[in-house]
Image: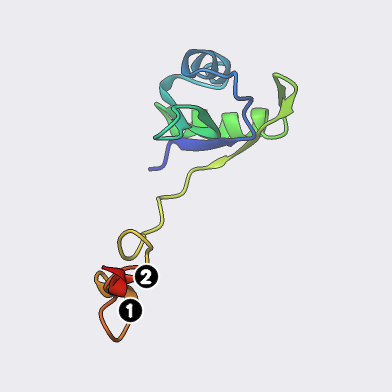
Amino acid sequence: MQTKVYVGNLSFDTNEESLKELFSEAGEVVSANIITDKFSGRSKGFGFVEFKTEEGMKAAIEKFNGYSYMDRDLRVDEARPPEKREGGYNRGGNRGGGNRRGGGGGYNRDRY
């Protein structure tokens, strides 16, 4: 049973407490999380709200999708599970040598 909604187009000034308070108008909120950039800590403009019941989740989608909050029209939809990401650093899946035949070796290696 899914009870979590995605909330997009959030103002960067929105905090988790105000988001939880707003969405509690639709039903009992278990948690509210705003996604932040891992380096700067700044909001990415979206988050997730989890409800105690599926009815609360559906009521939130109905009430708040397109709702104007802090001069932004919210986008609210049922949250989807995260997509599986392949590979590592560059998501290419090839973890060594950058897919070069010679194995890389670095920039301008004959210089020294």
> Is 26 in front, or is 4?
4
Q: In this view, does 103 lie to the left or right of 24?
A: left
Which image quarter: residue 91?
A: bottom left
Secondary element type, mark 2: loop
- Bin the neighbour count of mark 1 within 10 Å (Cα to Cα): few under 14, some 14-19, many 20 and up: few
Q: Residue 92 carries which label?
A: 2
Amino acid at pointer 1: Asn
Q: Is 43 above or below relative to 111? A: above
Rendered location of residue 79, percent (x, y): 48, 43
The residue located at (43%, 36%) in the rendering is 3
Name the quarter where the C terminus is drawn.
bottom left
Q: Residue 74 carries which label?
A: none
Amino acid at pointer 2: Gly
Does any portion of residue 93 appear in the rendered image?
no
Mark 2 in CB contact with mark 1 (< 8 angstroms) = yes
Q: In this view, does 82 lie to the left or right of 97?
A: right
Which image quarter: residue 18?
A: top right
* Residue position marked by numbered label 1 in the rendering: 99
The residue located at (48%, 13%) in the rendering is 17
Does any portion of residue 72 appear in the rendered image?
yes
The residue located at (33%, 73%) in the rendering is 98
Q: Is residue 74 left or right of residue 31?
A: right
> Is 109 in front, or is 27?
109
The residue located at (30%, 86%) in the rendering is 101
